[in-house]
Image: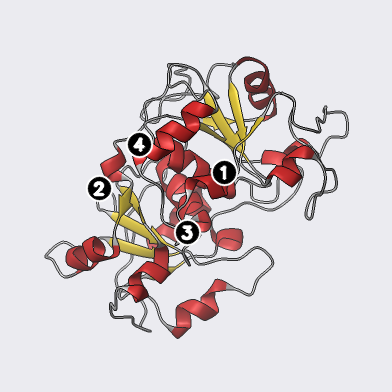
Amino acid sequence: MRTGILRRMTSTPGDSTHPQAPDAATLLVTAAGLAAELAGPNPPAVIDARWRLGGPPGIDDYNAGHIPGAAYIDLSHDISGTPGPEGRHPLPDTAAFQAVMRAAGVRNGHAVVVYDDGDGLPAARTWWSLRYFGHDNVRVLDGGFRAWTAAGLDTATGKPGAAGDFTASPGHMPLLDVASAEALGRNGLLLDVRTAERYRGETEPIDPVAGHIPGAVNAPIANTANADGTYRTSAELRAYFDSLRADHDGEVGAYCGSGVTAARGVLALALAGIPAALYVGSWSNWVADSSRPIATGTAR
């Protein structure tokens, strides 16, 4: 794999040493745990990332009620670049991402908690993006807003307070591009977290071509979640990924349609103790060039 594409989460650019997964205890927080922190002397910044592919906009849900003090961000408009050959949700401009996070109250060295409706997809992509741009104290609310309301906790309709001072610096999470994703399909473990039907090429509801990257192994994201949308335990996740040969001593990466669902895959892998790179462009980037190979069926 090319130097500088897959690198340690805490490294400087150009360091191709095998990345280290963050401690699982720093990745998730329960609704009760977050409520206690918000009532304490040093509450975290909270980001409401509710979003649905194709709409309706999550801002409507936010305005109807959200976790007290939370700021709203829109995945498509606030933390993604302009759709195009690089994918439907490419990386945003560093300065633009920094401005969005400062407006949301994100501060350097200060805890951040991200939540969504409960499927964990936009929250995981926001978690990954903050870590990629250098914020190392970010957690996801396990179960999202559904878990918060199910616990009978208060909601609010007010806006957040003061702006933050977060300084964005890209390159703090391992990243795949076309060349490194192709190489990982040959020589490592590239996980396709879309549904089995999309992986096999039987259907493709969004992108113009069906199938998968040659060598990729199907790992549907639903297999990482409990019925209520919370993450399975670290031991369960480790057993699942081990069954797919996700050896922590080898290189692992994940992709989906546009790098959103796969971000939840990267978070699930981290919970299992397995560091993994995200192919942000994912399938929408791969099929933008008709000369790239396409695989179908189940054989690796």
Q: Dot 2: within a 10 Å radius of its alpha carbon, few (fewer than 14), some, or many (20 or more) residues?
A: few
Read off the residue under disc 1.
262
Marks 2 and 1, how far apart at CA: 26 Å
Q: Nearer the viewer, mark 2 or mark 3?
A: 3
Residue at screen point 33% across, 58% down: 113
Residue 40 appears in which quarter of the rendering? bottom left
- Please tell me which of labels 2 and 1 falls first in the chain: 2
Marks 3 and 4, how far apart at CA: 17 Å
User: Amino acid under label 2?
Assistant: Gly
Read off the residue under disc 4.
235
State the residue lying farthest toward the left: 41
- Please tell me which of labels 3 and 4 falls first in the chain: 3
**Left or right position of 199 against 100:** right
Report x, y in % for residue 231: 41, 50
Check if mark 2's residue and mark 1's residue have beta carbons within 8 Å.
no
Read off the residue under disc 2.
109
User: Amino acid under label 1?
Assistant: Ala
Marks 2 and 3, how far apart at CA: 34 Å
Which quarter of the rendering shows the N terminus? Answer: top right
Residue 262 appears in which quarter of the rendering? top right
Which quarter of the rendering shows the C terminus? Answer: top right
Q: Dot 1: within a 10 Å radius of its alpha carbon, few (fewer than 14), some, or many (20 or more) residues?
A: many
Examine the rendered structure and indicate whether residue 145 appears above or below residue 205.
below
User: Amino acid under label 3?
Assistant: Ala
Q: Nearer the viewer, mark 3 or mark 1?
A: 3
User: Amino acid under label 4?
Assistant: Ala
Check if mark 2's residue and mark 3's residue have beta carbons within 8 Å.
no
Q: Of residues 47 and 217, which is closer to you in this image? A: 217
Read off the residue under disc 3.
227
How many numbered dots are placed on residues in this image? 4
- Please tell me which of labels 3 and 1 falls first in the chain: 3
Residue at screen point 59% across, 38% down: 219
